[in-house]
Image (cartoon, helix red, strand yellow):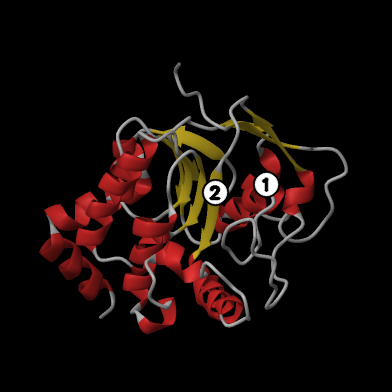
Amino acid sequence: MEFNGYLLSLKLKQEHLPNGYPFNIPCLKSFEKLDFHPNVTFFTGENGVGKSTLIEAIAVYLGFNAEGGGKNFNFKSTATHSALHNFLSITKGFKQIKDGYFLRGESFYNVASEIDKLDEEPFSSPKIIDSYGGISLHEQSHGESFWSLFMNRFSGHGVYILDEPESALSATKQIAMLSKINNLVNKNAQFIIATHSPILLSYPNAWIYEMSENKIAKVKYEESEVYRVYKAFLDHPQRILDNLFTSNT
């Protein structure tokens, strides 16, 4: 049977939206409905357009901790998430979600600390860290800890919501991550990813939503601003540097 995804679409309840953050971000109050690809859906765009805010709201709506982790994590360091999740409605498919994870790059340190804390409790067996490769995430570099998460914790048959997962990964590891994503997609995993990475955005047949100041629009890979900026620079780095530095003199 063809896998059609766990999450099908996302709607914003337009009635009685409050004032202030995040509803003062134009593109977050202007969309009505977004469809999810059954395999991989990307959100990309400039800083400040609301990518992380939207990704976080989707995760909280689905029952994930706002700072990240699986659904069994309920700690709170600082309550910084918005109320956007209260105004979302997500249509789900008929298949049961068996696994899931929310990676919020900026608070993954807090997740690592919570894992160590819980594993110190008496009778805590099996250890949570065993699902991450068995080595404390604090005993690894930032990039290594992210990679341990991807390689060990994700098992498929679930939804994985990732906010800028490339932030700790080298270009080589980002390419390797494409292979890991594909392996999990073949195990009926569904990904929703906010990213600035032209490498990750290249995943075949994914849907890419580009968020700009006033709208959220589906674009092709080569049409995305991330792709066009990186390509322009890599094709003519010296020309761009010369123009940049000349304009600053």
- Location of the N terminus by quadrant is top left
* Residue in front for this viewpoint, 20 or 114: 114
Cα gap from disc 2 to disc 1, whole angstroms: 10 Å
Label count reads 2
Q: Please, what is the three-letter code of the amino acid marked with disc 1?
A: Leu
Secondary structure of residue under mark 2: strand
x, y percent for residue 87: 78, 45
Callout 2 amino acid? Gly
Q: Quadrant of residue 33?
A: top right
Residue 174 occupies quadrant: bottom left
- Can you tell which quarter of the image residue 151 is in? bottom left
Label 2 crowd (10 A; few <14 / some 14-19 / many >=20): many
Image disc number at residue 62: 1
Where residue 75 appears, x then y in whole percent? 69, 71
Rendered view: 66 above or below 111: above
State the SS at label 1: loop
- Is 197 placed left or right of 49 in the picture? left
Q: Which residue lies at the image location 55% right of the left edge and 56% below the top edge? A: 102
Question: Residue shown at 42%/76% (left/top)?
Answer: 137
Q: Name the residue that disc number 2 marks.
A: 100
